[in-house]
């Protein structure tokens, strides 16, 4: 009898424990502890941590599996590997090679160190870690050289203590696709000495703008090298904005960015440029997206990624889809004449749609300004300050038919504009004066 009572007691205890376990699982599910690598912490509407990675049209070459092809001679095949966006070294499987077969090997790839500008004729000394057996590894750091208008030759000389290769690409970083370097020019002998000479008669020809230089190590131990890029001819720094999509001051551009990996933000493939002329007193850049997008601006060169962070002179990275950067002579760094590059990041996992407007103003205090907008029948009425006699209404970046009030220059009517806006829809309104000056964006929602 006592044994039955003890057995019954043990069974009840087990059932009680199982019940508590089930209750705990319901309250604290296991997947609640499966946090992503980077967790966004929100404080006062800002992110404590955002990890940025580059989107690219060219897929990286991370291959797993057995031998994939025959090679007559090993030195005729070079597979390049890279991982420019990881926070810390991470093993990837790539393809190595023997006399006859390519085979998998493990490679430790270092995080990206971004880009480094070169001065014409001044050598730079550095090194690259060893490559996996039978392959080549592309260095984390890429170098840039500015080619001004009128340049007749760009000469790039690489000298290494073992087998190093040299790649050059105009307007964007050298990438990896299918285990091969994506570049406009290359020099890949089996020696440690490589030279690339680019002139107007090359294919593609030499042009004004930014050239990116990448170096690969094809040995299994660290390679030391000296790199020198020399520009011949030309009349000073480039005045253009080569390598980006140009914007017209005050004119909105609509586009989109693909979604980012979970727990990170993806920098868009396309970067935009705006020329700031002499005498400009303000550069205003406004971004409006349908989800969490971030805005970065850099003078003279493209925004880059280093250690999972954007390399830029100015940034606006709230948790919203609306970001604004205003650069003036009192900013740090101050506004200056020349080319500004603008990059946009998507911090959501799905495609982001956005509107971008960059406005370079000679006199911000005299810009037109919208203070009020409302519908009047099938029209939209806009009221503000500093409108001139030729002012027109812009909606979502497009000029609209505008009627001016004969008694008040600061009142405009968008003819039949309300018919183009759905009830509850929000549009972006601006006023453009006859001298080209454009008001800041004014969001308007039709009741």
Image (cartoon, rainbow, N blue to C red):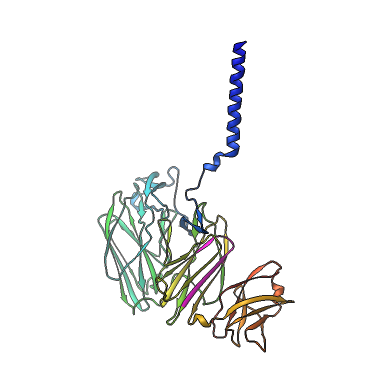
Work out which residue is located at the far right of the displayed protein and give it: 377
Residue 283 falls within the magenta-colored stretch: yes
Which image quadrant is residue 197 in? bottom left
Span colored in magenta: 282-294
Q: Could you tell me what secondary structure mostly forms the magenta stretch?
A: strand
399 or 229: nearer the viewer: 399
Residue 352, quarter of the rendered image: bottom right
From the top left corner, tell me how far across and down residue 93 is, in percent. Answer: 42, 46
Q: Pick whichever, 310 or 185, lies toward us.
A: 310
- Judged left or right of residue 388, residue 102 is left
Residue under the point 28% across and 51% down: 222
Q: Is residue 283 visible?
A: yes
Drawn side of residue 78 relative to residue 404, left or right: left
Q: Is residue 422 above or below residue 239?
A: above
* Residue located farthest toward the left when viewing the structure as drawn: 161
Is residue 101 in view from this perspective?
A: no
**Residue 1, x across and y down, in percent:** 62, 10
Give whichever of 46, 351 is nearer the camera: 46
The picture places residue 293, in percent across and down from the top left corner, at 53, 62
Image quarter (top left, top right, bottom left or bottom right) of the C terminus: bottom right
Residue sitting at 37 percent across and 71 percent down?
202
Q: Is residue 291 magenta?
A: yes
Q: Position of residue 297 (x, y in %)?
A: 45, 68
Q: Is residue 9 above or below residue 285?
A: above
Count up the numbered dots.
Answer: 0
Residue in the picture at 59% in, 39% down: 27
Q: Residue at x 55, y 61 (%)?
A: 320
């Amino acid at each position: 009898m006592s044994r039955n009572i003890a057995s019954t007691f043990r069974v009840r205890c087990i059932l009680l424990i199982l019940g508590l376990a089930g209750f705990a699982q319901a309250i604290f599910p296991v997947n609640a502890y499966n946090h992503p690598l980077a967790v966004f912490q929100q404080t006062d509407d800002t992110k404590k941590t955002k990890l940025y990675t580059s989107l690219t049209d060219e897929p990286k070459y991370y291959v797993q599996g057995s031998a994939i092809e025959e090679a007559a001679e090993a030195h005729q095949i070079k597979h390049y590997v890279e991982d420019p966006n990881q926070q810390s070294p991470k093993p990837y499987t790539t393809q190595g090679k023997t006399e006859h077969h390519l085979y998998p090997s493990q490679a430790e790839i270092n995080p990206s160190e971004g880009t480094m500008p070169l001065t014409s004729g001044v050598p730079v000394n550095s090194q690259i870690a060893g490559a996996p057996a039978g392959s080549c590894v592309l260095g984390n750091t890429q170098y840039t050289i500015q080619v001004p208008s009128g340049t007749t030759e760009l000469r790039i000389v690489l000298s290494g203590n073992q087998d190093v290769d040299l790649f050059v690409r105009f307007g964007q970083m050298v990438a990896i696709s299918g285990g091969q370097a994506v570049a406009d020019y290359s020099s890949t002998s089996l020696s440690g000495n490589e030279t690339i000479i680019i002139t107007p008669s090359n294919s593609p020809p030499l042009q004004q703008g930014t050239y990116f230089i990448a170096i690969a190590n094809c040995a299994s131990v660290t390679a030391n090298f000296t790199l020198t890029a020399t520009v011949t001819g030309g009349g000073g720094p480039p005045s253009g904005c080569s390598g980006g999509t140009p914007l017209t001051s005050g004119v909105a551009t609509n586009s989109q960015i693909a979604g980012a990996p979970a727990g990170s933000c993806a920098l868009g493939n396309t970067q935009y440029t705006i020329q700031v002329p002499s005498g400009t007193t303000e550069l205003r850049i406004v971004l409006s997206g349908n989800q969490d997008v971030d805005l970065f601006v850099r003078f003279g060169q493209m925004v880059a990624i280093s250690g999972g962070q954007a390399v830029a002179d100015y940034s606006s990275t709230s948790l919203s889809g609306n970001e604004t950067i205003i650069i003036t002579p009192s900013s740090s760094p101050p506004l200056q004449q020349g080319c500004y590059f603008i990059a946009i990041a998507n911090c959501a996992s799905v495609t982001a749609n956005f509107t971008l407007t960059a406005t370079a103003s000679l006199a911000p205090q005299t810009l037109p300004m919208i203070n009020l907008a409302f519908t009047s029948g099938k029209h939209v009425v806009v009221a503000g300050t500093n409108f001139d006699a030729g002012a027109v209404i812009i909606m979502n970046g497009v000029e609209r038919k505008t009627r001016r009030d004969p008694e008040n220059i600061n009142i405009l009517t968008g003819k039949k504009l309300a018919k183009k806006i759905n009830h509850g829809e929000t549009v972006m309104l601006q006023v453009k004066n006859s001298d080209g000056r454009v008001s800041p964006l004014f969001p308007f929602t039709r009741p």
